[in-house]
């Protein structure tokens, strides 16, 4: 069964569950034991589903090359090859693991491909030249892969990536970590057909870049099976997010939150202005800005609706902390004594908080707000800032971003937004993921924009986890709309008109 509406293929208004590899193995086992579906039958279903997906996506396919490893993933590949041969589609299988090393269902599937007339080769040099309508199938490594690639599979992956032909990955691209999305060397696929449970790694780290379009097939697993195995993550789309309610006809500005943006050290005023305008365009009733005196004129000129206040010390900030519902600290904050004073004062204010950028770096230093945990703040680190907050190398965060997001949330409480291709939102009840946005958004000011959006949503009444989820989605979708004119040269402020359209 493909992406239709069921417990694991919900409607667009329902979030999706993402699983670790071990959890998917548990699901497999339950399908076999409780639904009494033999393992070989599941393998045949997976192979047929992948073959059908290949034919649907590339209907003009004239030849197929399948790259098979030694486990169940390779077995799926042999089933695909056998089905192609049955339909008189020329198919060549690269046998990455000798047949005498295969066991169980994988060995049985190898025999099926051989009997149906697929051409089996053991050397990449024996593969035929790629023709116009050739499709490559990656069935080398499955969810059990971890560590470093070994010969000859490393050479096969390099061969696949050098080929001009489109690639279909079976279950997940070979070399991609199924849990974290980490990959050093991995297959870059145009599409991935994944089975039983959506693997978290397809939506994290390098997963979105390597997997291409993800097609899910539950292979007939029953809802009762999914009820027995907890998911690692919950993935939200635009339709599954809590939105702001419609405004009443007699609404007034004080009902929609007062946001204070704190930042803009010497030479860094633009970041605070971007965050302020983002809060305004997301719908805040009132927006204040506390910044260096030299940035006030620029703020009044660019956005006169923002109440800009010059502050030269934490003491001058103090009176501004009494009325806001939300305080966002960090855009252009810098790392000076002025910066530390402002964070120290704002971090102890009664209003809800959003911390970003240098506020996080100062927090990680341990001198300001040391030991403080708050249930009413949102921290929005990128990978480097996350590493500093935890005192670990960035490579460790990249290797397991879910663990890192959870660790930051446990250390500081509140809600943590770990930004990336799959942005994670960690909170007391779990971890969520939002996949949206594009590479054009890798430019200065985008994080400041997100800070202002999330702060505005909190001020308008959304709970912190809901505000973080919706804010990340608005940010990414606005980026996608703005990128219609091109990704290169995309600026943070280009997103503002689209944020306004999307938030309503």
Image (spheres, grey):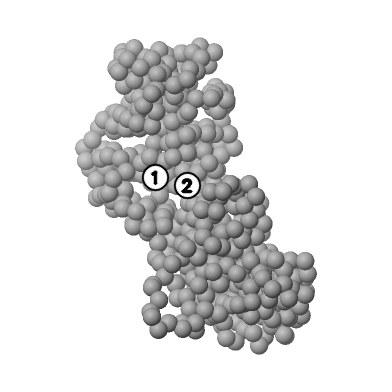
- Secondary structure beneath label 1: strand
| Residue drawn at 57 percent across, 86 percent down | 323
In the image, residue 393 above or below residue 206: below
The location of residue 285, given as percent across then percent down, is 52, 79
Residue 203 seen = yes
Mark 2 or mark 1, earlier in chain: 1
The location of residue 7, given as percent across then percent down, is 28, 51
In the image, residue 490 above or below residue 132: below
Disc 2 versus disc 1: distance between alpha carbons? Answer: 9 Å
Residue 137 disc label: none
The location of residue 41, given as percent across then percent down, is 26, 30
Marks 2 and 1 close (CB-CB < 8 Å): yes
Task: Specify the quadrant of the image occupied by residue 267.
Answer: bottom right
In the visual, does 349 lie left or right of 269?
A: left
Q: Residues within 10 Å of mark 1 (few under 14, many from 20)?
A: many
- Secondary structure beneath label 2: helix
The location of residue 401, given as percent across then percent down, is 54, 52
């Amino acid at each position: 069964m493909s992406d239709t509406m069921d417990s694991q293929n919900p409607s667009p208004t329902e979030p999706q569950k993402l699983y670790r590899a071990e959890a998917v193995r548990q699901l497999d086992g339950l399908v076999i034991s409780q639904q009494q579906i033999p393992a070989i039958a599941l393998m045949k279903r997976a192979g047929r589903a992948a073959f059908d997906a290949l034919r649907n996506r590339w209907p003009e396919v004239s030849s197929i090359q399948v790259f098979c490893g030694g486990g169940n993933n390779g077995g799926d590949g042999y089933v695909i090859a056998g089905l192609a041969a049955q339909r008189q589609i020329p198919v060549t299988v690269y046998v990455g693991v000798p047949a005498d090393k295969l066991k169980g269902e994988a060995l049985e599937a190898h025999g099926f491909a051989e009997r149906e007339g697929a051409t089996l080769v053991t050397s990449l040099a024996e593969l035929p030249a790629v023709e116009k309508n050739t499709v490559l199938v990656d069935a080398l490594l499955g969810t059990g892969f971890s560590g470093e690639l070994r010969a000859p599979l490393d050479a096969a992956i390099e061969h696949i990536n050098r080929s001009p032909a489109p690639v279909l990955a079976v279950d997940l691209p070979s070399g991609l970590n199924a849990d974290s999305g980490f990959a050093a060397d991995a297959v870059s696929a145009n599409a991935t057909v994944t089975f039983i449970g959506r693997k978290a790694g397809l939506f994290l780290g390098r997963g979105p870049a390597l997997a291409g379009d993800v097609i899910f097939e539950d292979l007939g697993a029953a809802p009762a099976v999914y009820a027995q195995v907890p998911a690692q993550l919950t993935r939200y789309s635009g339709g599954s997010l809590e939105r702001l309610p419609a405004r009443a006809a007699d609404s007034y500005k004080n009902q929609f939150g007062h946001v204070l943006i704190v930042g803009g050290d010497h030479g860094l005023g633009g970041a605070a202005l971007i965050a302020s305008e983002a809060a305004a365009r997301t719908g805040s009733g009132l927006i204040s800005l506390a910044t260096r005196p030299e940035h006030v004129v620029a703020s009044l000129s660019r956005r006169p609706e923002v109440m800009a206040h010059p502050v030269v010390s934490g003491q001058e900030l103090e009176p501004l902390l009494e009325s806001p519902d939300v305080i966002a600290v960090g855009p252009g904050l810098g790392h000076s004594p002025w910066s530390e004073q402002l964070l120290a004062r704002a971090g102890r204010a009664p209003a809800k908080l959003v911390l970003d950028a240098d506020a996080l770096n100062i927090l990680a230093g341990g001198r300001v707000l040391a030991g403080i945990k708050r249930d009413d703040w949102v921290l929005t680190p990128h990978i480097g800032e996350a590493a500093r907050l935890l005192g670990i190398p960035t490579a460790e965060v990249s290797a397991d971003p879910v663990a890192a997001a959870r660790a930051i949330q446990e250390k500081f409480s509140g809600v943590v937004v770990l930004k990336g291709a799959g942005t994670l939102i960690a909170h007391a009840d779990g971890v969520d993921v939002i996949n949206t946005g594009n590479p054009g958004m890798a430019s200065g000011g985008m994080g400041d924009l997100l800070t202002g959006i999330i702060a505005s949503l909190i001020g308008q009444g959304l709970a912190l986890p809901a505000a973080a989820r919706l804010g990340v989605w608005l940010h990414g979708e606005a980026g996608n709309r703005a990128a219609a004119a091109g990704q290169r040269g995309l600026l943070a402020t280009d997103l503002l008109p689209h944020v306004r359209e999307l938030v309503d």
